[in-house]
Amino acid sequence: MLTVKDLTGARQMLFESSDTLDPEVAAESVDLINAWERILAEPVIAQSDVPAFNRSMVDGYAVRASDTFGASDSLPAILRLDGEVAMGHPADHPLRPKTCQAVPTGGQIPEGADAMIMIEDTDDFGDGYRYLNRSVSPGSHLIFKGDDIRKGEVLLPRGITLEARHLAAAAAAGLQEVSVRRRLKVAVLSTGDELAAPGTPLLPGQIHDVNHVMLMSMISGAKALPCSYGIIPDDFSLLKDVMQQAKAACDVIVLSGGSSVGARDHVAEAIEATGSPGILLHGIAVKPGKPTLIGFCDGRPVIGLPGHPVAAWFMANQLLLPLLYRMQNIPLPQPKMIEAILRQRIPSNHGREEFILVKLSGDITDSPYTPVSAVPVFSKSGLITYLSRCQGYLQIPRDCEGLDEGSLVQVTLMDNDFSKGDE
């Protein structure tokens, strides 16, 4: 780590050496129920008109509009009731002049009808007729065949992220499954003899592996498929074997822990032994996260993250997530930023870009109209609970000589949870 790059250079190196998935090749068909938040690989073409028939928008009577002209409370139009259309079934016969047929909301109107009149605008005196107290124009209270979409039209364009509303539209158009991009497979490995799985009793000197859960969740949020390879002890041969398995099965490999220079840190050695060209960069001019490494093993990007959770979180956000979005050919979501007044001086950190966690107070939702205060949280990078209790962070450039109290700063929000987090 004697020669380090800045964060921008490290990200560029990662991008230039990584191939994006070919959306034409990397596709699979899935049923609609399992397609939520998947990326559409091919446009969805409507298989039928939606709706497939002329439908009523109200409970009432199907009529010929011309039979209602001039109707009013004082001089109602009188039409003979000539049947009822059952929901889910067509009419038994066409609508005859001077007659009406009862149709429920969503029901198919009979041939010959061109309007619906609501039941509350009619009277039923039990004599087999309906008395219409108002007139309706052609098309009143109707949805016509194909009003939503016509058969053969593009219903959903390629490349969108499928949400519930898209899937509902696909179902309405007669589809059972859609073609989506194959999810990028990301191997997640934790390294270290000191790690224990969450929920298991800790032996003396052990800590729970929080990075694994954190990274698996972040990868899922980036629309990729996290593949857990568990906790690997500080054993070079075992780590190399697991990495070979991960390389064969996954598109990207992410390790946490073991990236520092130490006698028992075998990550760099294992990356070199897993494939060519091996490590491209070990060390980034950033705090926290300097020990981060970047490598490639026979075309597979490898990112080695620090074991300290806060450093791992920042580097995953700055390197891993942009890589995953780029490889999947989808835009990287931009975090929300707000202006805030810094309530404590931040000393300089020469030579490294620095990320500072902050707690926010004030009405964040009303920024910039309501002043928001930012209080820096100077924590060690291993203290994960500080990360969960903060709402945002500052980025301080490498050449900045510190920030004074009272400065107006740009804060990147970590999520949409605007709770104060200090109760």
Image: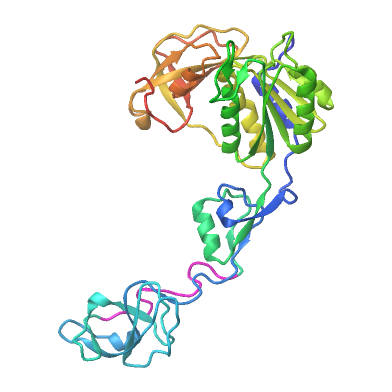
Residue 384: horizontal and vertical position, in percent?
A: 51, 19
- The residue positioned 21% from the left and 84% from the top of the image is 124
- Residue 178 shown left or right of residue 389 in the figure: right
Q: Is residue 354 visible?
A: yes
Colouring rule applied to residues: rainbow
Tell which of 206 and 263 is nearer to you. Answer: 206
Q: Is 114 located above or below residue 199 in the figure?
A: below
| Quadrant placement of the C terminus | top left
- Residue 135 shown left or right of residue 276 in the figure: left
Q: Is residue 390 visible?
A: no
Q: Residue furthest bottom?
A: 97
Magenta: main secondary structure: loop
Q: Which residues are magenta?
A: 135-151
Residue 25: horizontal and vertical position, in percent?
A: 75, 50
Q: Is 25 located above or below residue 244 in the figure?
A: below
Residue 358: horizontal and vertical position, in percent?
A: 45, 18
Residue 375: say if magenta: no
- The residue positioned 79% from the left and 30% from the top of the image is 244
Displayed quadrant of residue 248: top right
- Residue 401 shown left or right of residue 133 in the figure: right
- Residue 18 shown left or right of residue 227 in the figure: right
Tell which of 39 and 339 is nearer to you. Answer: 39
| Quadrant placement of the N terminus | top right
Tell which of 227 and 354 is nearer to you. Answer: 227
Residue 148: say if magenta: yes
Residue 299: horizontal and vertical position, in percent?
A: 80, 33
The mark tally for this picture is 0
Displayed quadrant of residue 389: top left
Q: Is 121 located above or below residue 379 in the figure?
A: below
Displayed quadrant of residue 107: bottom left
- The residue positioned 59% from the left and 7% from the top of the image is 350
- The residue positioned 82% from the left and 31% from the top of the image is 298
